[in-house]
Image (tube, rainbow, N blue to C red):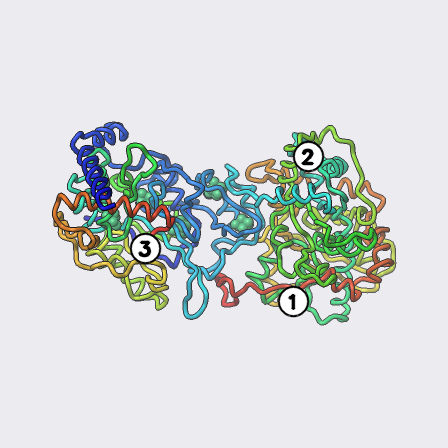
Amino acid sequence: MSKGVLVDLTKCIGCGSCTVACKLYNDNKFEKDSPAIGENPKLTDENWTIVTAKKTEKDGQPVWRYVKQQCLHCEHPACASACFAKAFQKTEEGPVIYYPHLCVGCRYCMLACPFDIPKYQWEKSFPLVTKCQMCSGKVAKGEAPACVSVCPTNVMTFGERDEILALAKKTIESDSKYVKHIYGEKEAGGTDWIYISDVPFEQLGFRTDVTTTPLPEYSHSFLKYTPYVIVGWGSLLTGMYLYTKRRNKIAQEEKKDVHL
Amino acid sequence: MDKQKARSTEMTRRGFLKMFGSLGLVGATATLAGCSKEPMGGKGWLPQQYQAASSYPSQVRGRVPIDPNNPSIMRDDEKCILCGQCLEVCEKVQTVFGHYELPVKDEVICVNCGQCTLWCPTAAITEKDDTARVLEAIEDPDTVVVVQTAPATRVGLGEEFGLPAGSWVEGKQVAALKKLGFDYVFDTNFSADLTIMEEGTELINRITKKSKAPLPQFTSCSPGWVKFCEYYYPDLLEHMSSAKSPQQMLGALIKTYFAKEKNIDPKKIFSVSIMPCTAKKFECSRPEMNDAGLHHGDETMRDVDAVLTVRELARMIKNKGIDLNKLPEEKYDQLMGTGSGAGLIFGATGGVMEAAVRTAYFVLTKQDVPEGLLNLKPVRGLEGVKEASLDIPGVGTLRIAVAHGLSNARKLMDEVRRGESPYHFIEIMCCPGGCISGGGQPRTALPPSNEVREKRIASLYAKDASYKLRLSHENPEILALYEKYLEHPISHLAHELLHTEYTSRGDKLTAKGSKLG
Ligand code: SF4
Ligand code: SF4
Ligand code: SF4
Ligand code: SF4
Ligand code: SF4
């Protein structure tokens, strides 16, 4: 059975404990110029999770909401479909994990992910792809992921995906403040991390235009997210390489990240 | 152009395929990962309480939220070990965190008390550092830098220089400030005496029904407490004394009275205060704290330009290579440098009450203050809530109560809210022990201990007992101030410069267990 995490955004106070726990547990660096919390944090190779302070509105009143982002651990992960080296694998317990020793550095996973999660270690001489591993080692031992366990307001509930989905349904049905949408129930064919909120997800920067069709395993249908690339392996490889390079350059120049 | 592009494309492709073909990258990444076939991640550590199998949350977990624009405190994430201590003090001792409903509204709820800076084991949370701004002002030859020192600073600073808790370093602190280049050094004890005159008169007006404001009257000198009341008890703000805190009174006078007496352009004055408190940084930035500015027709002028905690002052002294222990004792500058014992004990819980009662007794009875009021035992010490009834001849019984630490304040406030409070006057200090253990004091015990608190308190009371001048209304500089400038307590000018209004912050949160706000 697949594990999952329900994130109730109405409870988040933006303390950032989760981002610190992730760095402590995974031995990731703190970088002064790319904070993991605040109004404009970025997912990077060292920030596997971030909490964005969103100054938005609810019922005409200004409200602040905090959005924790990390890999959603798709049930049918496009990143894994795209990776012909099988460096990305979906485990039985739920986590979509990454094996550095299998990675060839092509970065197709980065193109394939509809949520723009995998990040490349651009600064390293032997770069790898990085992303939240859902603390697969902890989950395998029956422990909650690091970020989940430190949250002072219990924003996150760790459990069997079907159980947390049922909890999410019950919560939004029994309390009128919630929007009637469980993000991740259907997005990208269903994800193991699911979200509920009292403010519409679009307002919080969630990408709401992702397909709800499951991405069939290893079908390479991830190409639908990269329409500029001409099909055909030879030109595809080159094209994608240049594309990612250009994208990186653009990203670095603009210093901005895209959607969830 | 096109050719060049094509070539570079080809080269890139060749490079890419070569990397692929030679397995160089695969080999390299395998080396990097220590030839391990394990998935990425999990190579670090977590505090033990987070390592139990199960998804039951541990009791102490996570940390307080801190707004990046908080004027009082900040945090270095890299030093945070998620020990949960900041949250513990904020929630259990100060009853701020965890006492509002989620979701949040549109601010991070914090009363700026800085107790978390005293509890954080790694000092990840610290005061917001304002020393650079102060040094800049000192270095500018056109700026007159005036500084004031709060009562509790003189029994704290020494601890940063290896002295035992509670060591008395008043004169050395003045000497250090002069050595650092401050032009005038005044004493907040002076304006504590002034607070007694204004706040005491206000209390008498409430008791004698000269004023319509309700009883009990609350003290207003602790900015963390004031903000707490604005958040959680906005319905009781009418009880809050309109008198500003001693820091803000002195700030307003430095740019008016002092400027006039010394013939200095108030625009050239940079006013600094040394405080045992991080909430004072917030207080001086409150928009309405510009009364000297309004008086001079320049609303951008602040009454107090910068607040430094005792810890920041200690850093400045150490950075200049000054050894506090070797300095001679120096005296405060005249005009606003004399404080009574009553002003001094403002630094301890119960001290404001005792000081106020001494003067109120005299004003109401015109008789000498009896010995018992010079050692008002029932309001001294570290008990969370203290109370006393005093018989004032010809007037009746004055009922008073004192609380320190905001969880204790709640007990008295809930009573007032229910309409069951028997008191005339209530003193609240935001921090446990009062200002001597404020969020800007040295980290002498971790977390702060009652032993250290008691030593600092004992030091204040011992000095008070040794003073000849123990009554605010006998302070000659206070009398001179009224004579030369303010005329009398709550005069028109006193009202303009020394009194203030409060803002309900009830709409910034939904308090738990209450429909108010
Ligand atoms: S969110 Fe992206 S990286 Fe995570 S499992 Fe889904 S496709 Fe892969
Ligand atoms: S699940 Fe683990 S790896 Fe993923 S964001 Fe949380 S702490 Fe980081
Ligand atoms: S630890 Fe919890 S409350 Fe704090 S930022 Fe993360 S999700 Fe939000
Ligand atoms: S300053 Fe006080 S109120 Fe603010 S977070 Fe720290 S302990 Fe809580
Ligand atoms: S007390 Fe300090 S180290 Fe502990 S959780 Fe709070 S900020 Fe982190």
Q: Residues within 10 Å of mark 3 (few under 14, many from 20)?
A: some
The chain that hosts pointer 1 is B
User: At numbered mark 3, what does the secondary structure look like: helix, strand or loop?
Assistant: loop
Q: Give the amino acid at mark 2.
A: Gly
Q: Determine the secondary structure under disc 2.
A: helix
Check disc 1 and report the residue beneath it.
B238
> Looking at the picture, how far across and down is residue B278, in whole percent?
60, 48
Q: CA distance from mark 2 to mark 3?
A: 53 Å
Q: Nearer the viewer, residue B32 or B486?
A: B32
Residue A6 screen position, x and y as percent: 30, 54
CA gap, disc 2 and disc 1: 39 Å
What is the chain identity of the residue bearing mark 3? A
Residue to which mark 3 is pinned: A259
Dot 2 alpha-carbon crowd within 10 angstroms: few under 14, some 14 to 19, many 20 or more? many
What amino acid is found at the position of numbered circle 3 in the picture?
His
Query: Which amino acid is tagged 1?
Result: Glu
Discs 2, 3: same chain: no
| Res B474 seen here | yes
Q: Nearer the viewer, residue A152 or B289?
A: B289
**Can residue B146 be seen by looking at this rendering?**
no
The image's mark for residue B158 is 2
Q: Is residue A56 above or below residue B77?
A: below
